Image (spheres, rainbow, N blue to C red):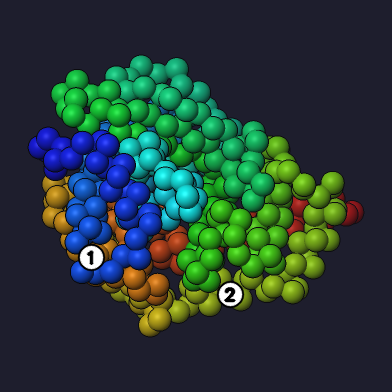
Amino acid sequence: MSGELSFSKNQIDKAGNILRKLSRETDDKEFNAAYASVTEWRALHNSHLKSISRLLKLHTNKVQKDALYSQRLKRIRSIILKLRFEGGPNRAGRLTQMQDISGCRAVLASSSDAQKVVRRLISSRTEHSLVKVQDYIAKPQSTGYRSIHLVYKNNSSKRPHINGTFCEVQVRSRRQHAWATAVELAGFFRNEDLKRGVGDEQWLQFFFLVSCGIAYLENESQPPNAPSSIIELGDQLVDNLKILRPFLWLSGFRSALKNTDISNTTASWYLIRFDSKIPKYFYTDYTFDEFASANAHYVELEQEYKDIAHQHVALVSADSFEGLQLAYPSFFNNSEVFFEVVDEILEKVIAAQK
């Protein structure tokens, strides 16, 4: 979308508040008008996203040539959930201040390499303003989540009407990424918001303990309330594995989808729909220049399936099909890396016990 914004930012915030509160009946005129405003606002983030993605690649390539990149525009359903989560039942979250409607990510081999990239980004020159840096590697969240987030505010001289849009950058290690996407995968299939610490206590504890183990592997800070030693961590993790048997669950998720067929193309955008009842994935791919068509189809599908819990829609981008698989294993059920990380932790526990 290249024209002027059809709505004021105040109207965008009001539209977000309408989506946050309504029951979302298909024929509700107020909802449909608000939905149109929000989807236009989301689409306007694309040029800023491309600019920040180029910046991220430039500095990441100086540290690791084969780092993994991905970028995405946030799903409308996720936008609504975040407005509800942040605003609460009686207080509106401001959509124009949401900082992760667009986002890009770099995944590097090690935590130290991830931190090198962040230092380069912080010291780099760009027309966009770096307004926030949150280091969840140095200070992990209580769930165990770890990554470094940087938020850029758009200051485009060429398109001033979209100034004030934000783009979030995430930089993390391969192990940290495996953990985060395993959490997303489990939450995706279990219909629980595990990444926000909401859901089954055994699953939350499992991922928390694995995060503690990753901290030992990478010599990084432990999350709050971590076990006092690697031995204690091992005891708790083994007990959890016996009760929960998470590998069987995660392997089952993967096996259910192994016959899904997708061709390796040179497409830049993939529109993905997953029906968790069958279960099966459906894909449509688009070239780099077909973003407008991809976004329009994305909006149509979100409208069609907005109230159907087992239907999931996402518009994602990656440098190649292989990159897409690696960047979004929650959509492709690629859990092998996470299994390897858990094995590494158990090996470290065994070594400490000798």
Q: Which residue is at 84% across, 47% downward?
A: 229
Find residue 59 and report its image quarter.
Answer: top left
Amino acid tagged 1: Asp
Instruction: Determine which residue is flagged by label 2.
Output: 249
**Residue 1, position in %: x, y?**
14, 43
**Residue 88, position in %: x, y?**
49, 50
Instruction: Determine which residue is flagged by label 1.
Output: 28
Q: Earlier in the sequence, mark 1 or mark 2?
A: 1
Q: Which residue is at 55% across, 55% downward?
A: 195
Q: Disc 1, disc 2: CB below 8 Å?
A: no
Q: Which residue is at 80% across, 61% downward?
A: 236
SS for callout 2: helix
* Residue 213 visible, this angle: yes
Q: From the viewer's perspective, tell me whether residue 146 is left or right of residue 3.
A: right
Cα gap from disc 1 to disc 2, whole angstroms = 39 Å
How many numbered dots are placed on residues in this image?
Answer: 2
- Establish if 54 lies above or below 327: above
Q: Residue furthest left?
A: 3
SS for callout 1: loop
**Residue 50, position in %: x, y?**
26, 37
Closer-to-camera residue (143/264): 143
Closer-to-camera residue (280/19): 19
Label 1 environment density (alpha carbons within 10 Å; few <14, some 14–19, many ≥20): few
Find residue 178 and report its image quarter.
Answer: bottom right
**Residue 104, position in %: x, y?**
37, 41
Amino acid tagged 2: Trp
The quarter of the picture where the C terminus appears is: bottom right
Q: Of the numbered discs in the image, which one, if any, rests on residue 16? A: none
